Image (spheres, helix red, strand yellow):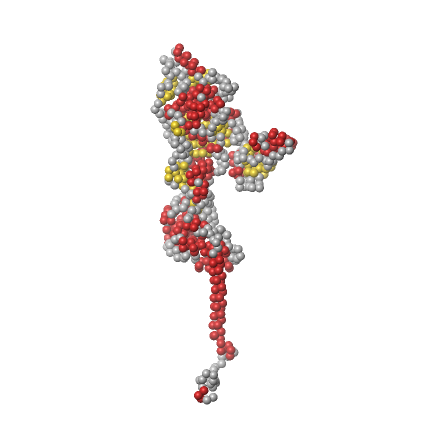
Amino acid sequence: MKESDRGRPGTRGPRRTTTRTATPGKSKRARGGGDNGFVRGVKMAAMAVIGVGAVGLLGVSLLFLYYGSDPNLPNLKKVGDYRPPQASRILDRNGQLVGTVGGPERRRVIPFEIIPKHFRDAVIAAEDPSFYQHEGLDYFGIARALVSNVLGGRIGPGRWGQGGSTITQQVVKLLVLSPEKTPRRKIQEMILARRLSKQLSKDEILSIYLNHINYGSGHYGCEEAAHFFFGKSIQKVDIGEAAFLAGVTQIPEKHSPHKNPESAKNRQIYVLRQMVEHGYLDLKTADLIAKKEIKVIPPPAKNEAIQAGEALGSVYRLLVEKYGAEAIPSLGAEVKTTLDLDLQKLARETLERGLEALDGRQGYRDPEGHLEGARLASYKHELKLARQAGRGGDTAKDAIAARKRGQKFNLRVLRDNEIFVGVVDKVEKDPARPKAGRFWIDVGGESGVVDLAQEARYAIDKKPLTERFRAGDLVRVRFAPERRGGPGEKGGPMPLALEIGPQAAMVVMEPRTREVFALVGGYGYRPGGYDRSQRALRQAGSTFKPFVYAAAIESGKFTAASVVNDAPVVYNLWKPQNYGKQAHRGAVRLRTALADSINTIPISLLHEVGMGPTMELATKAGITTPPPADVGYSLALGANSVTPLELANAFATFAAGGERQTQRMIESVNGEVLPPAAESVRAMKPETAYVLVSLMKSVVTEGTAAIAGARLKRPLAGKTGTSSGERDAWFVGFAPDLLAAVWVGFDDSKSLGEGETGSKTSVPIWTDFMAKALADRPARDFATPPGVQVLRIDPVTGLLPAPGTEGVEEVFLDGTGPKETAGSREDTSAADRLLMQGAGQ
């Protein structure tokens, strides 16, 4: 090659010779490309990672895009318009919690501003330390949880592990998403969390979370939790209490200090460490708090709803009337009632002890009979026919005749609280619990079950129920739908309860304001059960007599001193009799007649005054249930039906000076005082009401309720009542500032037993209650209104006392007192005229 060709494109220059030192043990290929190969490998690996990452990122993006565009993705509007399930808290007149209505979640939603900062800090440190920095998602936390779930085998088709959720994600999960744990739902949670963080401020999201979170045992939100665990508002919790509350929400039942104090303490310490780590608390303070015991108040010993379930049912109905049923689940109101929880508990305890005493006197805890063989089979057959009948007045006899004609009858569905005399088919014992077990009862072609663990009233005897009853025994049972949830679920045997004893009801109120203090609807009442205090329509018996006497006094035809003849008289082929074997007494003053509850006297008064005026006064006073159309003169003896609440309210009209008002149970809702449901009504003149109160004072001091007066020794008034056949026993009595009505009877109007009158059965229950209820109240007499005159009269004739005799005091409406003196010739003829009044002749 020429010298000039060197360096030109396409020509090859002379080979240059280079001297190199060989490296022992390596080939020329290895020696020549080692470093470059390593770099190329790294690059290839990097490119592979980037490729996989890109594919993964693309896949994740496509998943987010796919699920994000889902038209069924939940709307976040309900989060911004935060109205959570919030049961209304029902308080008694003294601020004690009676119970809640409107749903199972006890929650008190409070403004974010009043939640203390140290509590907010504790929650953020425990749940989401970067809450105020991220936009709804903690990507590092998600990645960490993802790796942990994959390595732990907690992720795969149809399932997703836990962890990595921010407070924003938890809000989304709690309010708009289902609780399922799937990749799809998790991705939707992340998408919605990002969206929510753009719609609401951080404080708004945190406020929702703090008001919504579950603290266990039906308590939700920090305010409710603070009251449940510490008995105070969240505003007053200290740092240690705040750390505990922030920690317990992880697994509320596990970390509850009531059930597992050690676990609760460990969670508190964890939260304190988190607060130190993230700068919310210094280490020294945290150590001091960690050494202190968590002091919580004990949980309620008894379900408040059981103490006042009757009143809670009434409050619920009143709230529905005011706000509508759809508003109740999230109403979250604080309802202050007129109830007195202490009197409520006292009323229930007194009534139940009184019923137990009655059970013991009459032997109600034993079987009604025992059948075997052919007699048992025959009875079961007749029971089934009776069950199939009963439609539209059919009888068992009708059912038998219908069967002979080939007509079929289906088993009639039992009504709430309906009584049946069933047959014990089987007794199941529970070896672990002698007082438990079950009775299987034939109630006419269908099997029912009695859960003996719920029969506390009859388990007070030493001998267990499972040993007192056997197959073939006849036993009174009632249909008990409130016991559904165990035996008696759909497809199983119907729920029954033993009904081998009478029931009772009590109403307690302030007579002038009609504020209801207590309602007891029966022995062992459970929410949703049959509330006899408001629903049981029972014959009033002699408790109706004061309204007849009031109409007589109001008419001006009679006074408290009027003498009426107690004698056998016939009215429209009806010959009324006095109770039991009481002989007729002849001339009797009205005061004595009411005190001793003589039957013939109010019938004479009704005959003289008239049915219309008498019923008009009673209706104005509060007897709102219409009497039977054919009641006739038996109205004077209480042949009409009333509820205990109705009768109590009507008697309160006497104590309130003749002014009738509607009973009142709600005082205020969220601080707003509710007006009376209706205007007051003038039922009778104040002076007439006072005369009747005076007459009813004699019932307590010397009449059928004398045992109450002898024990309580203070001004009291009232009236006993017993319906025909001893089916209903009443006493309604009152002091100037407290009234109580007591009714006792069987739900199916079976006789209580010989001698079980209002005096013997109801007055002792009333007296036991009033002795404690009035113990701390000063004894005062009933106020005398204008228009009342007090005169001394002759106790035999009701006229002015004869000269030289002292006589007795009697009260009159002004101008109606006697003008004549006992003992004169003219006065004798006047007394004869009085004897003829109301005699039906």
Horizontal and vertical percent position of residue 364:
54, 30
Horizontal and vertical percent position of residue 294:
42, 48
Q: Is residue 759 above or below residue 348?
A: above
| Displayed quadrant of residue 465 | top right
Horizontal and vertical percent position of residue 337:
41, 37
Horizontal and vertical percent position of residue 651:
42, 28
Front residue (pair 367, 57): 57
Q: Is residue 747 above or below residue 798?
A: below
- Residue 267 visible somewhere in the drawing: no
- Residue 134 visible somewhere in the drawing: yes
| Displayed quadrant of residue 741 | top left
Residue placed farthest to the front in the image?
71
Residue drawn at x 63%, y 30% is 401
Residue placed farthest to the left in the image?
786
Indicate left or right for 235 with 425 as reference. Answer: left
Residue drawn at x 59%, y 35% is 411
- Number of disc labels: 0
Front residue (pair 275, 840): 840
Residue placed farthest to the top in the image?
825
Residue drawn at x 46%, y 30% is 644
Q: Is residue 725 above or below residue 204?
A: above
